[in-house]
Image (cartoon, helix red, strand yellow):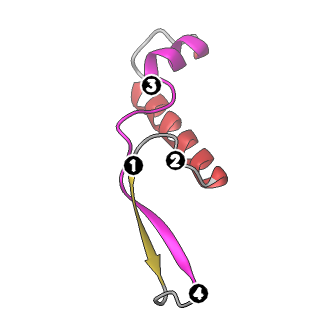
Amino acid sequence: MQYEWNVKTEPTLEPITLAECKEHLRVDHTDDDDLITAYIQAARQKLELETGRAFYTQTRVQRLSQFPTT
């Protein structure tokens, strides 16, 4: 049986804020805010995929190739 998980509703929080990330990177302008925010989200998604765990509350949908039998 094959199955897959799809995220239906993304979490409303990220593990690190934009301000914290910019402080760590020593960025003091707003030109790259959208890019940095996308990097934060991509890093969280990658780690969730690798660990199989959700860091924050989210809605996931599981699709099965067939109904499970015992």
What is the CA distance from the residue labelled 3 to the residue labelled 2?
Answer: 27 Å
Cα distance between the residues tagged 3 and 1 = 27 Å
Q: Earlier in the sequence, mark 1 or mark 4?
A: 4
Q: Which residues are magenta?
A: 1-24
- Between 57 and 4, the residue placed more toward the observer is 57
Q: Is 69 in front, or is 39?
A: 69
Give residue 32's quadrant in the image.
top left
Q: Which residue is mark 2?
A: 54
Dot 2 amino acid type: Ala
For the view shown, which residue lies furthest in the right direction?
50
Q: Earlier in the sequence, mark 3 or mark 2?
A: 3
Question: CA gap, disc 4 to disc 2?
Answer: 23 Å
Q: Pointers 2 and 1 in contact (CB under 8 A)?
A: yes
Q: Tag 2: Cα neighbours inside 10 Å, few (<14), some, or many (≥20)? A: some
Q: Amino acid at mark 1?
A: Gln
Q: What's the residue type where badge 3 is placed?
A: Asp
Q: State the CA–CA distance, disc 4 to disc 3.
A: 44 Å
Q: Residues within 10 Å of mark 4 (few under 14, many from 20)?
A: few
Residue nearer the viewer, 1 or 39:
1
Residue 54 in the image: x percent, y percent?
52, 47
The residue singled out by tag 4 in the image is: 1
- Crowding around mark 1 (Cα neighbors within 10 Å: few <14, some 14 to 19, many 20+) is few
Which residue is found at the position 39% from the left and 49% from the top? 58
Q: Residue 32 shows which numbered tag?
A: 3
Q: Secondary structure at mark 2?
A: loop
The first of marks 4 and 2 along the sequence is 4
Per the image, is 47 magenta?
Answer: no
- What residue lies at 47% left-to-right and 81% top-to-bottom? 64
Is 52 drawn above or below residue 67 in the view shown? above
Residue for point 39% across, 17% down: 30
Q: Earlier in the sequence, mark 4 or mark 3?
A: 4
Q: Is residue 8 magenta?
A: yes
